Image (cartoon, helix red, strand yellow):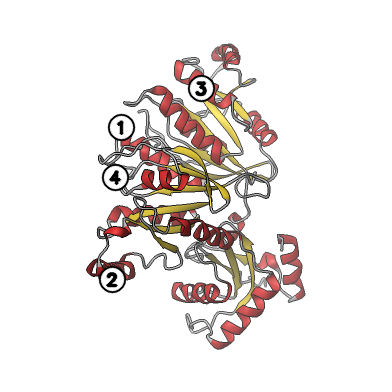
Amino acid sequence: MNGTDDRAAMADLGLDPDEFSAPDGVLGEGQDPEELVPTPVLAVVGRPNVGKSTLVNRLIGRREAVVQDIPGVTRDRVAYDALWNGRRFTLVDTGGWEPDARGLQAVVAAQAEMAIRTADAVLLVVDASVGATATDEAVARVLRRSDRPVLLAATKVDDDRLTSDTAALWRLGLGEPHPVSGLHGRGSGDLLDAVLEALPETPRDDVGAAGGGPRRVALVGKPNVGKSSLLNKVSGELRSVVHDVAGTTVDPVDSLVELDGEVWRFVDTAGLRKRVQTASGMEYYASLRTRAAIEAAEVAVVLIDASDPIAEQDQRVISMVDEAGRALVLVFNKWDLVDEDRRIAMKRELERDLVRVPWAERVNVSALTGRSVAKIAPALRTALASWDQRIPTGRLNGWLSDVIAATPPPVRGGKQPKVLFATQAQTRPPTFVLFTSGFLEAGYRRFLERRLREEFGFTGSPVRISVRVREKRSRKG
């Protein structure tokens, strides 16, 4: 059911949708329902210290991106909500490209693919006062091969003296350069107009669409857990380098794999050793690529070494998948090395360390022997079916009424909040919005999620529940 139908259904119940708001602190685990409507994404890319974050602040109309005079301040990709001429879109500020130990081209390709894969359009930012560098040209070559619209912004054009110099940027082959000053705002309106022309009305939905190609699987986990061995086993050939030294894989390796009669696109990623904020050099970029693979995937297979205790890195990777809202399958590898004592210890570890994702699909395998590898495909299908699942509004509200009648929300501030209406705002992951007369405690939201899963399944997929509270109308004398 779309938003228009939901408004009509609420009107039939005598509810005015415009009376509801979502103040800070109300949403709990979910998002503001206004932000649940998918918006097209613009990725802002470029070299370090060309003024991307300053331009981002100008385009979104507020100072949120961190700006300093030293290069490389922005590392992780950060998303901001933007509004121009009545249209909303998401603007993603990315870290700058710079050479690492593996060379310029590897980093440029990885970062550009990250931006292209997750965006509806790309904005390349070039410092007009410097002109196009070798890095800019390398980035432009990658962007020209993409199927996304690409815009070119020439920044730091603070006065007319540099305007004529921007003409030289035509040679990048990305079309007309847009002179702009992030500091003073010159040309920002014209650039935003061009951005709206390039962005689609709604975000492109490449992943998992009917006829849209193989479902995308991110194969992630800590180093030396057997990711490459598992990929080689399921693909039936040597696709990834396997070595006893942890961390052999640095770049993601895309592989089309036929598994249980269906073709899947697997991405074998580098293992995560350190937190992204503290990793450096090759490990830093490996961490970025792993996070990008998760965000670009539909379902993540998190590989865990069953022969060792569940580690902090395992929990951190699982948290990344959960926070990204992707379907999840936990694959416990090296099961051939697990004896009875280890199984007993594992049961305790699962109850203690994986309590955050009791809904995840679990498979025990041995990449070395091929034991139970065939069970991975059914687990992937179950998780993706849950990720795609939509509950009709009528059925959802009928079920919710029965649950609340049996177990009402706890009293808060002397009043018992009422749940007036519910709707599923989106899938991938399933996201529900509850329209209420008052705040719902976090414990009660978790209770509703448990009951929701008992009734409708959602095995292998995260579920988001947001609360939207009806505003109190002020009385005018």
Look at the numbered discs 1 and 2 and tell me whether their residues touch, using CB distance below 8 Å. Answer: no
Please tell me whether mark 4 or mark 3 is closer to you in this view: 4
Q: Which residue is mark 4?
A: 273
Residue ID at (61%, 84%): 402
Q: Which residue is mark 2?
A: 348
Disc on the earlier residue, 2 or 3: 3
Q: Which residue is mark 1?
A: 281
- Residue 437 screen position, x and y as percent: 59, 76
Could you tell me how far apart the alpha carbons at marks 2 and 4 are, in whole angstroms? 25 Å
169 vs 429, nearest the viewer: 429
Look at the numbered discs 2 and 4 and tell me whether their residues touch, using CB distance below 8 Å. Answer: no
Under tag 1, what secondary structure?
helix
Residue ID at (61%, 15%): 170
Residue ID at (42%, 39%): 289
Q: Is residue 449 left or right of residue 368?
A: right
Please tell me whether mark 2 or mark 4 is closer to you in this view: 2
Look at the numbered discs 1 and 4 and tell me whether their residues touch, using CB distance below 8 Å. Answer: no
Disc on the earlier residue, 1 or 4: 4
Is the residue marked by circle 3 packed among few (<14), some (14-19), or many (20+) residues within 10 Å?
A: many
Under tag 4, what secondary structure?
loop
Look at the numbered discs 2 and 3 and tell me whether their residues touch, using CB distance below 8 Å. Answer: no
Residue type highlighted by circle 2: Arg
Residue type highlighted by circle 3: Val
Name the quarter where the C terminus is drawn. bottom right
- Residue 391 screen position, x and y as percent: 65, 68
